[in-house]
């Protein structure tokens, strides 16, 4: 009997949490134009710190410039 009551309490809490989450996702927040999602503020902070840059069309220059012409192999004898 106790086991059934505990299971029903857990199921009830899950249902309440699910309904609350759906309610929060449906209602809009007035923090910004897009509804106040956290990703907009996160992107803004990353842009300020210079860690988020837009794609300019060119791949970033490699740190090490190795080609087949400037590499050589000398086996040990």
Image (spheres, grey):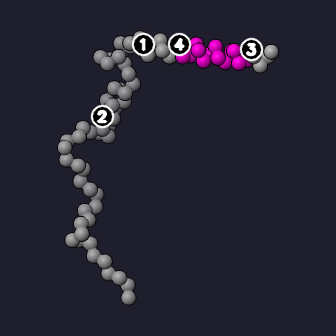
- Do labels 1 and 3 touch, CB within 8 Å? no
In which image quadrant can residue 4 be found? Answer: top right
Q: Earlier in the sequence, mark 4 or mark 3?
A: 3
Categorize mark 3 by other alpha carbons within 10 Å: few (<14), some (14-19), many (20+): few
SS of the residue at dot 4? helix
From the image, state whether disc 1 or disc 2 is nearer to you: 1
Identified at 27% across, 76% down, the residue is: 72
Residue at which label 4 appears: 19
Q: Earlier in the sequence, mark 2 or mark 4?
A: 4
Q: CA distance from mark 2 to mark 4?
A: 37 Å
- Do labels 1 and 2 touch, CB within 8 Å? no
Q: Earlier in the sequence, mark 1 or mark 2?
A: 1
SS of the residue at dot 2? helix
* 66 in the magenta segment: no
Q: Which region of the structure is painted magenta?
A: 6-20
Identified at 24% across, 50% down, the residue is: 60
Question: Residue 28, how many percent across, how many down?
Answer: 38, 12
Residue at which label 1 appears: 26
Categorize mark 4 by other alpha carbons within 10 Å: few (<14), some (14-19), many (20+): few
Residue at which label 2 appears: 48
């Amino acid at each position: 009997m106790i086991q059934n009551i505990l299971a029903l309490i857990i199921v009830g809490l899950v249902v309440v949490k699910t309904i609350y989450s759906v309610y929060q996702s449906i209602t809009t927040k007035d923090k910004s134009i897009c509804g106040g999602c956290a990703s907009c503020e996160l992107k803004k902070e990353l842009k300020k710190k210079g860690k988020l840059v837009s794609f300019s069309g060119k791949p970033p220059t490699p740190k090490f410039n190795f080609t087949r012409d400037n590499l050589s192999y000398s086996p040990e004898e």
